[in-house]
Amino acid sequence: MRGKKNLGNIHVLDFDTLLQANLREKDRAKILILKFIQETGYASRKMVVENLSMRPSTVSKSIVEMLEDGIIVELQTKANSGRGRPEWLLKLEKDRFWVVSFSIMSVSLIATIVNLAGDIVDEIVVKPDKNLDAKAMAKIFNGLITEFQQKAPVGTTLLGYGFAVPGLIDKQAELWRMVSRFPRVRNLRFEQVMGYQEGNVFFERNIDAILNHCLVSDPSSRVGISLLLHWGYGIAISCAVNGTLIQSVGGLFGEIGHWTSTVEKETTETLESMAAVPKYMNMYHWNEMLDESAIQRSVDDGFVSDSDLEQITSVIIRVLRNLHLAYFPSTIYLLSPFVNQARANEISRQLEILLEPFEVHAPHVLVLEYSAHSESLGMANTVFTRTIQPHLIARW
């Protein structure tokens, strides 16, 4: 089976995770009420009671607290036919809370303000020198954090900062160990970033953030094994079992771009040197400041020859076969400037053929439409879900 998934379907709260983390019934009730109001857009108290089968007193107490905290607002509407009491409708106050997400697309650093509705409120794009070191990178992070802190409107709360970055993330050692596109950024300590010691800063691999966004946006994908292959400036995978991301000590899980293969004349190359974007930068005179969505447009316009695309696609298909035989995912997400819908269909067809001798079920292949904000919004999922919980604890 094949399909397309648009990362523009915005969800910034993982309600399933919030519900699992709150065992008190009144806390869960409050979370479910907020979920219902957000999903319906507008809801009256009567609608909440009837749809969630809750006691009116439970609904009333939860709503009063959320109104007091500014999480939701109440709007008066006219009564039907001008008769009777006017109805009050509740809606999410989307700008009450917001987070800042940092992501790196190709070699550009994108800092994005995201509100509770998943709207992009503001954005700053910085193009760091490729030769800067970890200290200089941390200085850029802290300068942007200070700038965003000063932008916080009165009556709003900045919950925290999320960093979705490529390369090796070692959470146990609290290090961003390395990233090939900034070769001198080595062992950047999380504690160098403002707010980390206070628990307001979170680091994730960029593709983990994207896969998390897919899982939050489509709850049905949280059953079984889901695998995301990112094939662009680098090559790596992210994997989740029943909605929980697999992450290893040292941050090495999924860095398949460094796998090696023997090619002609018995020379050895890594997957990235054979099939990733940098291979074609010199060959096709690409500007290294291009982001991956711009590179995808170039590929779609025929800038890369069909024979080159076929050659690197054949490498990726064999990689997908091996990954499937290792993890047996029910769903494989493909995110790549080299993959449009037609190419994804061909990849899926050939993958099914390669898997036939093993008598295993072929996975459901979904090609993701690349978005400039895919990492940012995926990281916003994590920051909101981890920081908003204290504001959803019932006080009654």
Image (spheres, rainbow, N blue to C red):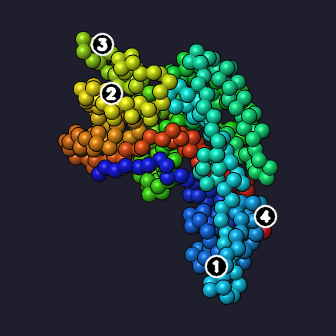
Q: Nearer the viewer, residue 328 or 209?
A: 209
Q: Which residue is mark 2?
A: 303
Q: Nearer the viewer, residue 53 or 171?
A: 53
How packed mark 2 is, by other alpha carbons closer than 10 Å (few <14, some 14-19, many 20 or more), is few
Q: Earlier in the sequence, mark 4 or mark 1?
A: 1
Image position, residue 217 (x, y; %): 50, 53
Q: Which residue is mark 1?
A: 46
Q: Which residue is mark 3?
A: 267
Secondary structure at numbered mark 1: helix
Image position, residue 142 (x, y; %): 72, 29
Amino acid type indicated by mark 4: Glu
Amino acid type indicated by mark 1: Lys
Q: Earlier in the sequence, mark 3 or mark 4?
A: 4
Secondary structure at numbered mark 4: helix
Which residue of the protein is positioned furthest toward the bottom in this rendering? 83
Q: Earlier in the sequence, mark 4 or mark 2?
A: 4
Question: Label 4 to label 2, Cα distance in Å?
Answer: 56 Å
Q: Earlier in the sequence, mark 1 or mark 2?
A: 1
Question: Label 1 to label 2, Cα distance in Å?
Answer: 58 Å
Q: Quadrant of residue 87?
A: bottom right
Q: Earlier in the sequence, mark 3 or mark 2?
A: 3
**Is 360 positioned to the left or the right of 270 in the image?**
left
Residue 290 can be seen, yes or no: yes
Q: Nearer the viewer, residue 105 or 257?
A: 105
* Residue in the picture at 59% in, 25% down: 127
Q: Earlier in the sequence, mark 1 or mark 3?
A: 1
Which image quarter holds the C terminus? bottom right
Image position, residue 208 (x, y; %): 51, 40
* Residue in the picture at 76% in, 44% down: 152
- Disc number placed over residue 68 in the picture, else none: 4
